[in-house]
Amino acid sequence: MAVQPDSGGKDDVKTQFVTREGTYRLMTLSEYSRPNRVGYTSGSGSSHVRVSLVSLPPGPGGGPPGSDGQGSDDRICFNHGKELYVYVYRGVKKAADLTKPVDKKMYKGTNPTCHDFNTVTMTADSVSLVIGFSTGQIQLIDPIKKELSKLYNEERLIDKTRVTCIKWVPGSSNLFITAHASGQLYVYNEELTCGTTAPHYQLFKQGDGYSIHTCRTKSTRNPLYRWVIGAEGSCINEFAFSPCGTNLAVASQDGFLRVFHYDTMELIGRARSYFGGFLCVCWSPDGKYVVVGGEDDLVTVWCFSERKVVARGQGHRSWVSVVAFDPYVVSFTDPESDEGVEDDRQKSESVQCYRLGSVSQDTQLCLWDLTEDVLRPPVRARASAHLSPNSQTFSPNGVPGMKVPAKGTKSNKIGHKHAELSGQNNPSGESSGAKQPAKTKVNNVSTLNISVGKAKEESSGSLGVNSLTQRLAGFSFGDRRSEHRRNFSLSKPAEQKSSASNTVALRGKSAGATTNDSFDPLKLIGTASCPRFDECPVLEPLVCKKVAHERLTALLFRSEYFVTACADGCVNTWARPARSLNGESRPLRRFEKIDLVD
Amino acid sequence: MSICQDLGLNFQQRMGANISQLERDIGSEQFPPNEHYFGLVNFGNTCYSNSVLQALYFCRPFREKVLEYKAKNKRTKETLLTCLADLFYSIATQKKKVGSIAPKKFIARLRKEKEEFDNYMQQDAHEFLNFLINHINEIILAERNQSTLKLQKNTSGENVTCNGTVPQSAEPTWVHEIFQGTLTSETRCLNCETVSSKDEHFFDLQVDVGQNTSITHCLKCFSDTETLCNDNKFKCDNCSSYQEAQKRMRVKKLPLILALHLKRFKYMEQYNRHIKVSHRVVFPLELRLFNTSDDAVNPDRLYDLVAVVVHCGSGPNRGHYISIVKSHGFWLLFDDDMVDKIDASAIEDFYGLTSDIQKSSETGYILFYQSRDASC
Ligand SMILES: [Zn+2]
């Protein structure tokens, strides 16, 4: 039986790692935890240690009051078990001082689960922090001034289930949103009360698989809105506003990512996990992509403009708990240096490569380069695929006239296996090609794309001969999947194609009851919401490192460092590579906020 | 219960939990019609059997076939299958909705059938499952051959020798149809580069467990390329000699019910015995396979978790087995004669431990995933 030696979790925890931009180092003195940390404790059960960071505006006298005069404007908040801590965060420059927390709280009978600072109302000596709890309540405090403390859903009349995510509405001084394990999302105004009775709701808006309600009362009270999302009682695991604040992405346990226009409350897009729940979600800094991570161990990249899953990242050994783009590592196209680029590609500057980070229950951090050629395949390849899908000489890699044996002939098969079997020396150690492109599944292909299916076959034949240009080290296609996707994308412009070609999908036993057919994963497989595994490019991580003893639960990127946290309550800071060592590489620039034009 | 009591268990709290509590937890209106939740009495370390039987009872396609067998086969002679059918029938036809049943006849028959189980020791639940599935399948095949023989005798009046190639035997049994999948192993000779492939059937997949991994990852590792060298060389037909080779096993036919055995008992030479590996291995409620072969028929078959046999304790011959099952949308915990409704979020208590400090653990041991396209 093919088995791997048991890694046993004893392999070393890395304290530094190298990428093309240089070496990232764990700052051991910048470790934040509870003040009297008693060694290494195993976190059994769920311990969702989350981290919130805020940079306060500088005070009038330089160093803000409340700090120790060492002049840091940053505050860090994290929860662990029944406790919540707020410290002055001194980044990578100075060691953490755990003896003097700005604030600490210990709760009885409930655990804090999530929190968020309000960046609109904050001043040098004041900041609002909302905290959600495992029993459904919400607290608002000012950890610096300490005079503020309000409770919402105190009697649990609004929702009794765990608060899974809490965030201030972008740009708002008083509105915040909570998501709950019950599958509901509530909009609160911190200035309003919650009333002494359970709210009576009236339907405000309804759409495919969701409904929005308001409170039916004379005086305005909390919650302002209740969003009921997805299958009944399926936990909302995380939500995220687009950088422009217009759109809201919601990741749910029912395996769906739903993207709403927040103000109009319209569902504008969705994706389905390959299997299992989606646990985390984030937006690319320009709002063009949404990335979700989940129980399929994958990171899934969804393109906003095309409303489709454009890539999947495979590298984690367990569920993906946090995804986050690093807005400080972005490569832009440089028309001159981009050799071998198709003529018809846009010359204007655009993002060439996004940097994505993810952490998982596998205790590993993965960094991914999402390159333009994967996310937006070159136009020419599409065009040629479109023009000559049946041509025997068609070659997606631009080698003209090369005869490609049809797949299924003996020699080709062996060649392919050879290529795959010897592909095990890739950097991540993951099998480079778990699957080769599926052969045409006749019963799943509609007349519309039979020809495309053929093109697919042929392109797979060129396998062992051509290797794709890999612009960036450590990056590769799982197979030659991108080609197939390019071909495939032609006849699958949108999700709508599903019904025609997927009616073969076998009936689900529960279909028809309460479940909406359009959310049936057996029908969605093979559509833009959930491509088959071999129809979508599979990315491998740029780096994949074990960075903790325990499950990782937080990841935040800042200009000089990034922060991770794990279930044992350890919050770590990693310094970015020194800039001077990096002179020869492409300029790294902070991504400017680009409002989405839709 | 007292015999296979375990060190770190919380389940004693539920001792004496009365039956009506379960009905109250489910609610009389929500209680599914024609469904019965009956615990199984422990006859002294028979929890390995009880836990597996409950899991199988809630694999609906299996239960239905067993009950169908019971309806079709008028008693001829007692076999383990007739005992199982009687037990399932007895649960399914109870007047009360909840309670407990003593699987006396089944256990007695089991002890007659297999020497290893004829004692009061704790047994390995997976060994039992393996034995039970294979044994039932053999019974069905034997009965089929017998009836074929009879039929042929009657029609032709000649004696037909049963040589095992009777065409009917090649037809899959309902046990095959439910549990059998196919693995294809591809081997590439490193000398002549020839790739040969061979198919083999399985009733369950046995996967190694890694710390802080998912069952998805364990299955991927199962299909990792392995190099055959040294004493384990591959006999290449092309080279007509033993050669170094690379081998990989992937799933070609995905079964209706995918049973996954987590290999949690590792033989440790330094202790001269098996040690429990309590690693935390998460298993999602929904699963697809990444390790399918290129010619797999239905590579994106979607599975739902329907039952988990859980091992509680510190070693293979000590501790206790329980099972959690999904029925009509909610989860139940069967601990011998006791049945409790549990929240789906409680399943994470059975993933395992992230540190090796604790000796005892309650961990998923056999996972039953049922294909969503299974009609039932
Ligand atoms: Zn050979």
Image (cartoon, rainbow, N blue to C red):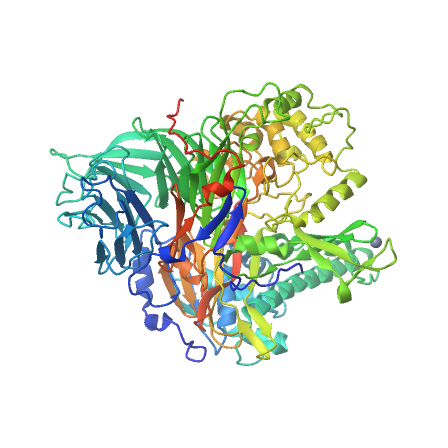
Quarter of the image with the N terminus of chain A in it: bottom right
Residue A406 location, quadrant: top right
Q: Quadrant of ligand 1?
A: bottom right
Q: Is residue A565 left or right of residue B126?
A: left
Residue at 68% in and 43% down? B294
Viewer-proximal residue, A46 or A372? A372
Viewer-proximal residue, A62 or A432? A62
Q: Can residue B98 be seen by looking at this rendering?
A: yes
User: How many numbered callouts?
Assistant: 0
Quarter of the image with the C terminus of chain A in it: top left
Q: Is residue A159 left or right of residue A364?
A: left
Residue at 31% in and 34% down? A211
Where is A283 relative to B115, above or below? Answer: above
Where is B170 relative to A489, above or below? Answer: below
Q: Can residue A446 be seen by looking at this rendering?
A: no
Residue A439 location, quadrant: top right
Where is B266 relative to A109, above or below? Answer: below
Q: Residue furthest right?
A: B240
Residue B221 location, quadrant: bottom right
Q: Position of residue A403 (x, y in %)?
A: 79, 28
Q: Position of residue A212 (x, y in %)?
A: 28, 33
Viewer-proximal residue, A130 or B64? A130
Viewer-proximal residue, A540 or A219? A540
Q: Position of residue A503 (x, y in %)?
A: 55, 32
Q: Is residue A58 left or right of residue B214?
A: left
Residue at 55% in and 47% down? B288
Q: Position of residue B71 (x, y in %)?
A: 56, 58
